[in-house]
Amino acid sequence: MKKVLFATTALVFSAGIAAAEVSVGGDGRMGVVYNGDDWNFSSRIRVSFTASGTTDGGLEFGGSVRADQAIAATRGTSASVYISGAFGKLSMGDVVGAPEALFGDFYEVGYTDLSSAGGSNDIGYLTADNGGNVDCTSVTTGVSACANSGPNLLYTGTFGAFSVAASMSDGKVNGATIGGLGVPVAVGNGTVGVTDTSVTQEYAIAGAYTFGNYTVGMGYEYSNGRNQLSGTDMDVDMISLAGVGQFGNTSVKAVIAHRGQDADVDWYGIGASSVFGATTVGGYIQYAEDNNANTDVTWYGLGAEYDLGGGASIKGGIADSDVSGSDAVADLGVKFSF
């Protein structure tokens, strides 16, 4: 159950102005994960805060942040804030790119969002996927490092049956992170090879049209600049076509895409989920072919969940790929939403 805290201080000093509202929620999970070699316990809990308010003119504003994002949120590389009205919604911070804002990803398999050697249920968007971490690589120490282009800017709007979105970064590195933990590393740190104050510039636009139980759309993404960690100049764009259909209790999503310019990658994916009372079953299959490297990979996942009510569910799944030497991964556990 979410608990609501009212900004009583604002009431004391601003009589006659509607109070802002802050809600506290969170999520948790516990269970076992098979990593392809052995079974391991896996658990976590996260506390989140969502704030909202309304101006005298009727504009709505707010933001959301998890407790574990507190440091990165001050730089805009985690969490996000927004302002919205009849014009649409303008968000900044740890936001997705325009196509992902309209089309989303495939059904999440497993209670830990299982990732196989090929990938996960995430659709391979070019820009700002999962908040704007770009230029990820493994440095000589064997530690993963990323440059973060955040805070990023996202606009979304719905006008009748049409939905539009646009997003961009400012082309500057806000901070480098190591190990995916959001731990900042100073620009110029030789350990991660960051030598420049510029980072990949990202732009994206997308549009969708909904008719009845069906939605079709298209996205265009462009990324250019210097890879912070490899020192390589890259120009890459991506065109994607998406379709979503609802057939009774079954939802189906399909996306095809091509990356061009300095890349030449064809990508296809389809996912579906069906609801049977308290049980949901879903999965996906994705394929990518790198024509420059003459390589390809197929990855897939299948999972199910049972709603226990009250914000708890039992969820599990299995994921695998055709990458040589890779093994299937699986998990089973309980998820909580507070």
Image (tube, grey):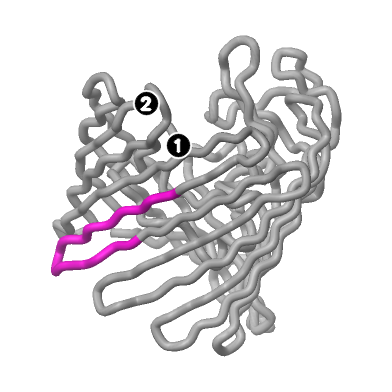
Would you name the residue on which mark 2 appears?
326
Q: Which mark is residue 118?
A: 1
> Label 1 neighbourhood size at 10 Å, few (<14), some (14-19), many (20+)?
some
Residue 195 to residue 284: above or below: above
Q: Quadrant of the N terminus?
A: bottom left
Residue shown at the point (85%, 28%) measured from the top left: 196
Residue 106 to residue 208: above or below: above
* Outermost top residue: 141
Who is closer to the viewer here, 217 or 158?
Answer: 217
Magenta stretch secondary structure, dominant: strand
Give residue 52's quadrant in the image: bottom right
Instruction: Give the CA distance from mark 2 to mark 1.
Output: 9 Å
Residue 162 x/y as whole percent? 59, 83
Residue shown at the point (48%, 77%) measured from the top left: 215
Q: Is residue 202 left or right of residue 267?
A: right
Q: Is residue 218 left or right of residue 173?
A: left
Asked whether the viewer can see residue 79, the reply is: no
Residue 154 x/y as whole percent? 67, 62
Residue 85 to residue 314: above or below: below
Asked whether the viewer can see residue 309, the reply is: yes
Amino acid type for the residue under numbered disc 1: Gly
CB atoms of marks 2 and 1 within 8 Å: yes
